[in-house]
Image (cartoon, rainbow, N blue to C red):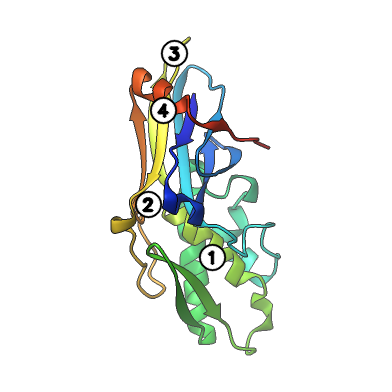
Amino acid sequence: MYVYRNSRFMGMLAHSFVFVGADSFGELDNSRYIRAQVPAGSVAVTATGVVVGHPDLGAPPISGYWSTLGGCSAIDWRQWASAQMHEVVAQCMTSLQELGRECGATVTDTPVGAGWVWRKIHIPACNPQVRGAEAAYNRLSLANSAVTVSLRAEPGATYYLRWSLVIGEARRTPGLEPMKFGASNGQHLDVVDAVTGAKELASLHEEKTR
């Protein structure tokens, strides 16, 4: 299986994190592809877009009181945007929103171009136990807008999936309301035919994974 993205001028502003099943295959940059061996049977491929330089993706969020809340305690941060985590991610985001309301948290968005924004959550000192909650929420917001394709892999078959970002479809998430899975902020993950996939792949470079 190949997951790839074609070269785009605006592609320098964003990259994608790719998960095949529960396994992370790291970042997918502009003009790159990822090669993954998958077993025969049902497989879910998930990709989530992120602005280059996102400050909350260098390491898992610092554990604290927030990580004991409903859903948050069940998240495996090695699989944070995989399809297997969708339900607990949604639960954790709801818990973090409730915690923010209790503490009087506020949100500010700073446009960074191409329809993307930095989202900053300001949590007053009234509850120092929530250290790390902002980084967790920011990362989970990316997981919440991921796109997932499920397919049934046949033995010996090769599959090509193309990730793309349509700038005109990018949109902000209002307030602290959780996005439904599939609200992809202009992202697309499409299965393409073998002829098209092989032709487009020929001009790309393989991404170093894990």
Identify which residue is drawn at 43% across, 38% down: 6
Reading the chain from its start, which is encountered first: label 2 or label 3? 3
How far apart, in angstroms, are the residues tagged by discs 1 and 3? 37 Å
Q: Which mark is residue 117?
A: none
Q: Residue 97, image x and y in percent? A: 47, 73
- What secondary structure is found at the residue carrying circle 3? loop
For the question of whether residue 89 can be seen, the reply is no
Q: Quadrant of residue 63?
A: bottom right
**Image-based side of 73 in relation to 119, left or right:** right
How far apart, in angstroms, are the residues tagged by discs 4 and 3? 18 Å
Tell me which amino acid carries mark 3: Ala
Circle 1 is placed at which residue position? 138
Q: Nearer the viewer, mark 2 or mark 1?
A: 1
Tell me which amino acid carries mark 2: Phe
Q: Residue 139, image x and y in percent? A: 55, 60
Reading the chain from its start, which is encountered first: label 4 or label 3? 3
Circle 2 crowding by C-alpha within 10 Å: few under 14, some 14–19, many from 20 = some
Circle 3 is placed at which residue position? 157
- What secondary structure is found at the residue carrying circle 1? helix
- What secondary structure is found at the residue carrying circle 2? loop
How far apart, in angstroms, are the residues tagged by discs 2 and 1? 15 Å
Tell me which amino acid carries mark 1: Asn
Q: Which mark is residue 200?
A: 4
Q: Are marks 2 and 1 in contact (CB under 8 Å)?
A: no
